[in-house]
Image (spheres, grey):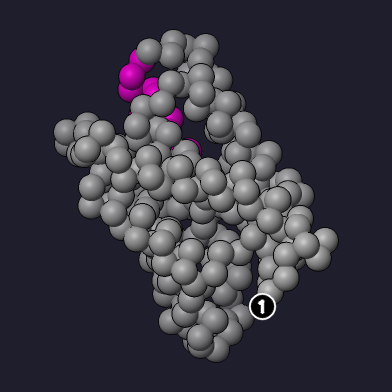
Amino acid sequence: MIKFLTIADVFSLINGCLGVLAILVLFSFINSFDVIRASFSFILLALLADGLDGIIARKTRASELGEYLEAMADMISMGVAPSVFVFKIYYETGSSGLILQLAFIVVLILFIICSIIRLSSFHLMKNEAYFVGIPASVSTIFLLIAAFIRLNYLYVLALIIILSFATISNIRFPKPGIKVNAIAIILIVTTLFMGGIYNNLAPLLLFSSLAIYVLVGPFYVWKLSNGIVFKK
């Protein structure tokens, strides 16, 4: 089986392993803030590994396992890990009460189900120009940052439901170019290093940038498909 692996697949494996570490560290007995910070960082690193996986895959030979391996790794780092991260934060606060904690369980299960559907069907709906449904990486970052900055749990519940259905929707989002991807990487790395300092400035910048992408992206794809936007 090892013979089927390529360099890109190694980064998929790293992606999955970082997702597992993000989950495991949440159950450690060290300082609570350090636990949350470490888990947050592991998931962001997993997203970077996923991005490197795609870049390397396009530059090297295609792998027979690549699409399946990537989907399984993404399920861990972009489905299970952020769900556990969110639940850990809002369960520990204790402010939501039993009923709302049960509500978190229900909506997070919904998020997991929608993530499974999206990631298992991703290769069937591939398109060179756009993503069908909101990208898993985008929904992961939204959830991560919302929980990290301790957004009100009612807003987070609503966000989880919206993101769940957005991942399996037919809404089309543009595939970012090299410049946009470079900016995204810079924002993720900045968030990794700056974390919650300066009133969560870096995470909020990343969150805001993604919000613009989600709001403007579908309109751009619609204009492009209708011939309103032309490539030079």
Which residue bears the numbered disc 1?
232
Residue visible at 52% across and 11% down? 99
Residue visible at 31% across and 58% down? 189
Q: Is residue 210 left or right of residue 124?
A: left
The span shown in magenta is 82-94
* Whole-percent x, y for residue 102 in the image: 53, 19
Q: Is residue 52 left or right of residue 64?
A: left
- Counting other residues with Cα less than 10 Å from the Cα at mark 1, is it few (<14), some (14-19), or many (20 or more)? few
Q: Is residue 23 left or right of residue 180?
A: left
Q: Main secondary structure of the magenta part?
A: helix
* Whole-percent x, y for residue 67 in the image: 61, 70
Give the camera-side residue of 27 and 145: 145
Say what secondary structure mark 1 lies in.
loop
User: Does the magenta run of residues contain 192?
Assistant: no
Give the camera-side residue of 222 and 134: 222
Which residue appears farthest toward the left when viewing the image? Answer: 31
Please tell me in which quadrant of the rendered image residue 36 appears: top left
**Residue type, mark 1 in image:** Lys
Where 222 falls versus 35 (above or below)?
Answer: below
* Whole-percent x, y for residue 122 in the image: 68, 61
Where 226 falls versus 27 (above or below)?
Answer: below
Can residue 69 be seen here?
no
Name the quadrant of the C terminus: bottom right
Give the camera-side residue of 81 and 215: 215
Residue visible at 29% across and 37% down? 200
Where 154 falls versus 64 (above or below)?
Answer: above
* Whole-percent x, y for residue 179 in the image: 47, 69
Residue visible at 56% across and 50% down? 213
Can residue 172 be seen here?
yes
